[in-house]
Amino acid sequence: MKMTESYAATVAAVAPVILLVAVVEINNRRQRVRELYESLTGPITLIRAMFREGGDPSAQQVEDVARQVRATNVGARAGLAMVLYVLSAVAIISLLFLAELASLLWLTGSPTETAPGVALFCAVALGAGFAWVAYAPMLALVLPISRNLLYVLGGVADYRRFLRLLRHYRAQGAASTQAAPGAPDA
């Protein structure tokens, strides 16, 4: 495959369209990502506080937290799907940006009698514009995740401990720890 002028011009014309569609898509999902991570941090905060207060939490405390975990209605698959979405958005936007910039730079690589400096300036300006349009919304998508991800991951050990305690209390047959009929387990 050779880079020809017509090919580079096509890439330079098509890549921004796809790039802008991708940016619109991630902008539409940004609020959903924020809500997902906010809903995950609520129960984790309760679980961590329950174990930080020392001693063994009562069956009622465990059941209260279990109710709140069920109320978030966030499954592991939804969280994993959102993480995969974010990673694929970052990869696709980066590839589109690099393809656009490479085609523009290639087109400016064969200078003509007309001002090659202007052509290079246009390529740099377009590249900076694409970077701003693409990376600003992407950073807005990634920052809430990176801020909360370490907190959520830190709560995994406490969540496992919480589940063991919940099973223990339910195995003892305490009436207050029984799940409502048809309710999923925490």
Image: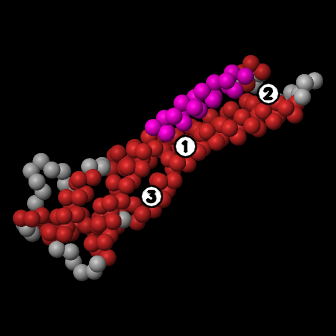
The reply, left or right, for residue 173 in relation to residue 113 is left
**Residue holding disc 2:** 107
Instruction: Tell me if residue 39 is in the magenta stretch.
Output: no
- Is residue 167 something that shows in the picture? no
Mark 2 vs mark 3: which is more N-terminal? 2
- Where residue 63 sits, quadrant-wise, is bottom left
For this rendering, which residue is in front, 177 or 137? 137
Q: Report the amino acid beneath label 2.
A: Leu
Quadrant housing the C terminus: bottom left
Residue for point 82% across, 30% down:
119
Please say if 37 is above or below 11.
below
Q: CA distance from mark 1 to mark 3?
A: 19 Å
For label 3, count other residues whose C-alpha is less than 10 Å away and answer few (under 14), some (14-19) or many (20+): some
Residue 160 in picture, x, y percent from top left: 29, 65
Residue for point 81% across, 36% down:
121
The reply, left or right, for residue 133 in relation to residue 118 is left
SS of the residue under disc 3: helix
Residue for point 10% across, 54% down:
180
Main SS, magenta residues: helix
Which of the labelled discs sits on residue 162, or is there none? none
Residue for point 15% across, 50% down:
183
Which of the labelled discs sits on residue 137, or is there none? 1
Please say if 110 is above or below 144.
above
**Residue holding disc 3:** 149
Magenta stretch? 9-28
Instruction: Tell me if residue 11 is in the magenta stretch.
Output: yes
Q: Are marks 2 and 1 in contact (CB under 8 Å)?
A: no
SS of the residue under disc 2: helix
- Where residue 117 sits, quadrant-wise, is top right
Please say if 72 is above or below 52.
above
